[in-house]
Image: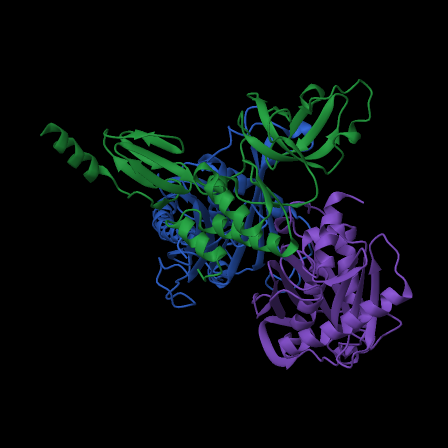
Amino acid sequence: MKSAKYEKRFDGRDWEELRPMNAKVGIIPRADGSAMFQIGKTTAYAAVYGPRDLHPKFMQNPRTGILRCDYNMLPFSGHGERVRPGGSRRSKEINLVMQNALLPVLDLTDFPNTVVDIFVDLPQTDAGTRCAAITAASMALADAGLSMKGLVSAVAVGKVGDKIVVDLNYDEEAFEGGAADIPVAVIPSTGEITLLQLDGEVSKEDLMKALEYAKRAANKIHELQKKALKEKYHE
Amino acid sequence: MNGENSKMKTANALKVQDRDIVVPGELLCEGEGFVHGKNIYKKENKLFAGMLGMVRIEKDIVKIIPLSGKYMPKEEDRVIGKVIDVLMSGWRFEINSAYSAVLPLKEAGSDFIPKGADLTKYFDFDDYVVAQITNVTTQNLVDLTTRGPGLKKLRGGRVIQVNPTKVPRIIGKDASMVKLLKDSTGCDIQVGQNGLVWVSGDPEKEVIAINTIKKIEKEAHTQGLTENIDAFLKGGKK
Amino acid sequence: MNEQKQHLLRALAKGVRYDGRALTEFRPLKVELDISRSAEGSTRVLLGETDLFVGVKLGIETPYPDTPEDGNFMVNAELRPMSNPEFEVGPPGNQAIELARVVDRGIREAHAIDTAKLCIKKGEKVWSVMVDVCTVNDDGNLLDASGIGAIIAIKNTFFPKLKEDNTVDYEEKTKNKLPLQKEPIPITVYKVGSYFIVDPLPVEEKLSDARLTAAITEEGIVCALQKGGESQLTTDDISKMLDISIDKAQEIRKKLKL
C-alpha cells in the first residue's frame, strides 16, 4: 500500500484540528427536543418527537420504547446538482447506523410500546454529515429529557495521503493521492465507540492511531455539546 | 469530630454544586458518602447524571430535577384530556403523553348511563375534561375518573401546552401561583399535571394569563420567580 | 359549531387574536440570507416561531419543445416531519403539493424570472431554476412564509460558472444574479366566522372556514389566487380579502426593503 505525500491541509488546519463549530439547543419549539450542530460548512438540525404512540402496532415492543432515525439531506444541500428528495439506499443505511450509534446511551424501558423519532435535516453539507447528524441528535435527545447514560459525539477521522487527520472536508475526501474516511461516534464519558465505518485503505496500526485521534476530537465536541445544553438555561 | 470529618469528605468529593445544570454522563461525585435519587446512575464509587437536569443537594442526598420530558401518567394525578374516541363502554382521551387514557362509563359521573346510550351526549369528540387518574398498569394502560370534586367537562376556553416538568411552578406552593394568575387576570384557570392548561376569561386577559404562564415555564428553574411574576403581572418590566 | 371555535370567535369579535395581535397584524418577520453554501441562493424565514429554509439550485436541462428558448422553473415543498408532529416521513402529501403549487404560480404568473434570459442554446440547453421549501418549525402560515422566502431566495441567487462545454462548475459562483423582473408577495387571508385575519397561528388555521391566497406584485396587481378551506366565500368577502392582501403585501415589501 503506497500513499502520496499530503504536505499541508487544504484549508490550513493542523492535522488534529477540527473545523470551526457551533451548537445550539432548543431551536425547534414544536419538537420535544432539538439542536443544531455546525462544523465547517456542514450543518445539521435535529428534532426529537416522543416517546409517542407507535403505529403500526406490530412494530411495538412491550419491553421498551424503540428509536427511529431519519437522516435527510435537503435538496439544495449537496455538492453539485440538486439532490432528489426522498430516501436513498445511502440515507437508509445512515438511519440504521445512527440508531445504533445512539441506542447504547439511551434507556427507553420506562416507555414500552412507544417510539422516539429523531429527524435530522441538513441544509448544507461539506463531508462529515452522518457524524454531524449524530452529534446534533444526541443533544436533541438530552434536550427532550430522556434517560441517557451519556452524550454521543461523532467525528470523521481518516487518512489523507500519508497523514492521519481529523474532520476531513470534502476536498480531503476526494484527495487524488488516496483517502480513507473513518466516521467514528464516541461516548466521551466512557471512551466507548458506537459508530465505526471505513471507506478506503488503512493499516491496522494507523487505524488504531486514528481512533485515538477520534477520541480526543470527540472530547472537544463533547465540551461544546455540554456548553450548548447548559446555555439553554443560562440566558 | 468524626461528623466534621465526614462532612469535609463529602464536600471534597462533590464535583457539582446545588442548582447546577448537568448533562447526561456528567460526573456528580466520587466516594461512598452520598445517597442518590432517580435520574442518577452509579458506576464503581462514582455517581453520574442519567439525564439533563438541575442538581439538588440536601445533606448527603443528590437528586436531579428534570427540566424537560414527556408526561408519565401517575395514579391520583389530575390531568386535562381531550376526547379522541368514543368506545363501547366509555371514552378514550389524549392526555399529552405517550399513552392515551380510558374513562369507563361507571366513572363518568353521578348519573347512571344506560347501555346503548349515545355517549357523545356526555362527552363529545374534542371535548376537554379535568379528570383524575385511577390506575396505571405496568404497560401504561391508564384509567380515568371524572367523579370527584372539581372533576368536570371544560366548557369554552382554550387549552395550551406547557412542559409538564414545569407544572409544579405554574401551580406554585399551595396553589399560590395559579391563585395569583387568577386574581390578577380574572380568568378561570385549570392546570393539568400532564402539562395542559385551560384558560377562560376576557380575551385580552387570557392573553396576559397565557403570556405569564409561558414566562413561568421559561424561568421555572430560576430563583425569585414569584417576585418576578408578580412584578410582570403588575406591569413592571422583567 | 364546537365550543373551541365559539371561544375564538368571541375573542375576534373584540378584535383580539389568541396571541394578542390585531386581526390583520403579522408577527415579526426575520429573514437570513445564505444559510446554505451548497445552494446557488438560500434564505431562512422566521415568522414568529414559524421557521423554514428556501434553497435555489440551478442546473442545465433541455427546454420544453413549445418554449425552446425559455429556462425551466419549478417549486417543491417539503413539509418536514421535524417541523410538526403531524407531518410524516414519505413523499409530499396534498398539503405540501398545494403549497408548492401556490408558491410556484405566484412567481410564474408574475413573470418574476426572465426565463428568456436563461437560454444557453436554443432548443438544447437552458438553465433550470429549482426552488425547494423545507419547513423547520410550523407555527402557522407556512404559505406566506414560503412565498416570501422563495422570492427572496430567488432574488439572491447567483449563477455558478458555466464551463466551455456547457456544463456547470458548481464550485465557482459568478457575480451574475438571476434575472428578476417582478417580486410578487403572497398574502393569505383567513375567514373565521365573519372575521378576516392574516398570519394565523396553528389553532386559528384549524378553526378557520376558508382562506384566500393572493400573490401581489409591486404595482398592487394580483397575479395568482388560491381559494382554500371547506367553506364558500361571497364576492363581497373576496373584495374585502383582496384589499387586505394588497395592503399587507406592500407593508411587507417595505419592511423587507424589496
Report whether residue A165 is seen: yes
Horizontal arrangement in the rendering, residue C89 relative to residue C101 (left or right): left
What x and y, as percent, mark residue A26? Answer: 50, 52
Q: What residue is rendered at 76% in x and 34% in y?
A: B124
Horizontal arrangement in the rendering, residue A232 relative to residue C73 (left or right): left
Judge by depth and name the residue closer to the eye, B88 or C228: B88
Q: What residue is rendered at 73% in x and 38% in y?
A: B126
Q: What residue is rendered at 72% in x and 52% in y?
A: C8
What x and y, as percent, mark residue C251? Answer: 68, 75
Judge by depth and name the residue closer to the eye, B226 or A108: B226
Report whether residue A2 is seen: no
> Is C102 drawn above or below residue A144 in the view shown?
below
What x and y, as percent, mark residue C39? Answer: 61, 67
Give the quadrant of the C terminus of chain C: bottom right
> Is C63 drawn above or below residue B4 in the view shown?
below
Which quadrant of the structure image shows residue C190?
bottom right
Question: What tint does the image give chain A?
Answer: blue
The tally of labels here is: 0
Question: What tint does the image give chain B?
Answer: green
> Is A20 drawn above or below residue A193 in the view shown?
below
What x and y, as percent, mark residue C107? Answer: 77, 71
Q: What residue is rendered at 60% in x and 54% in y?
A: B205
Which quadrant of the structure image shows residue C117?
bottom right
Its colouring scheme is by chain
Which chain does the purple colour mark? C
Horizontal arrangement in the rendering, residue B197 relative to residue C6 (left or right): left
